[in-house]
C-alpha cells in the first residue's frame, strides 16, 4: 500500500509525491502517518512537517492534515497557509525575526508576536 502526500497552500501545490512516513505536530501532540493509517483530520501547529522520503523537511505555518484511504493507497493532504522547504530558509533572518518577536513579547502579551516567534523558531530549526 502506498502513501501519497500532497502539501498545498492557497497559492499552489507545493509538493506531492510518494513517501514512507509523515511526521507532524498537531495542536494536541505529534502524529506519525504510515500507509494504511486510519482516516484522520487534525489541526496543525506551526512546526516542521517531516516527510520520510527526501532529506528535506517543510516548515508549515499551521493548517490541517487530512488522511484518507482507498483499497490500494493512503493519501495525506496537508493544507497550510504557508509552507517553505527547510533548505530554502534563511536561518539568520529567521533568528533575527525571533529576536524581534521576543522583544515585543517582553513589552507585553501580544498574540501576533507569539505567532511570529513560533514561525521564526520553526524556520530557524530552534524548536526541535
Image: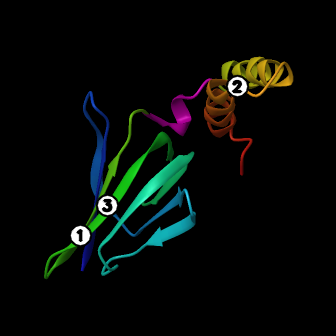
- Measured as percent of width and height from the top left, residue 103 is found at 83, 19
**Measured along the vertical axis of the image, is residue 121 above or below residue 32?**
above
* Mark 1, residue position: 68
Residue bounds of the magenta highlight? 83-90
Q: Are marks 1 and 3 in contact (CB under 8 Å)?
A: yes
* Mark 2, residue position: 110
- Measured as percent of width and height from the top left, residue 43 is found at 44, 54
Left/right of residue 10 with respect to residue 20 in the rendered view: left
Tell me what residue is drawn at x 62 percent, y 25 percent. 112
> Can see residue 96?
yes
Q: Residue furthest front?
A: 109
Q: Residue furthest left?
A: 71
* Mark 3, residue position: 66
Left/right of residue 113 with respect to residue 26 in the rendered view: right
Q: Which is closer to the viewer, label 3 or label 2?
A: 2
Tell me what residue is drawn at x 48 percent, y 41 percent. 60
The quadrant of the rendering that contains the N terminus is bottom left
Amino acid at each position: 500500500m502506498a502513501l501519497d502526500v500532497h502539501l498545498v497552500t492557497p497559492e499552489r501545490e507545493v509538493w506531492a509525491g510518494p513517501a514512507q512516513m509523515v511526521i507532524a505536530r498537531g495542536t494536541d501532540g505529534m502524529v506519525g502517518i504510515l500507509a494504511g493509517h486510519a482516516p484522520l483530520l487534525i489541526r496543525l501547529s506551526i512546526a516542521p512537517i517531516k516527510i520520510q522520503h527526501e532529506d528535506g523537511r517543510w516548515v508549515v505555518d499551521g493548517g490541517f492534515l487530512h488522511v484518507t484511504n482507498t483499497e490500494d493507497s493512503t493519501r495525506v493532504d496537508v493544507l497550510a497557509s504557508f509552507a517553505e522547504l527547510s533548505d530554502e530558509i534563511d536561518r539568520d533572518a529567521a533568528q533575527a525575526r525571533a529576536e524581534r518577536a521576543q522583544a515585543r513579547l517582553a513589552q507585553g502579551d501580544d498574540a501576533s508576536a507569539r505567532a511570529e516567534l513560533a514561525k521564526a523558531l520553526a524556520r530557524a530549526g530552534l524548536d526541535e
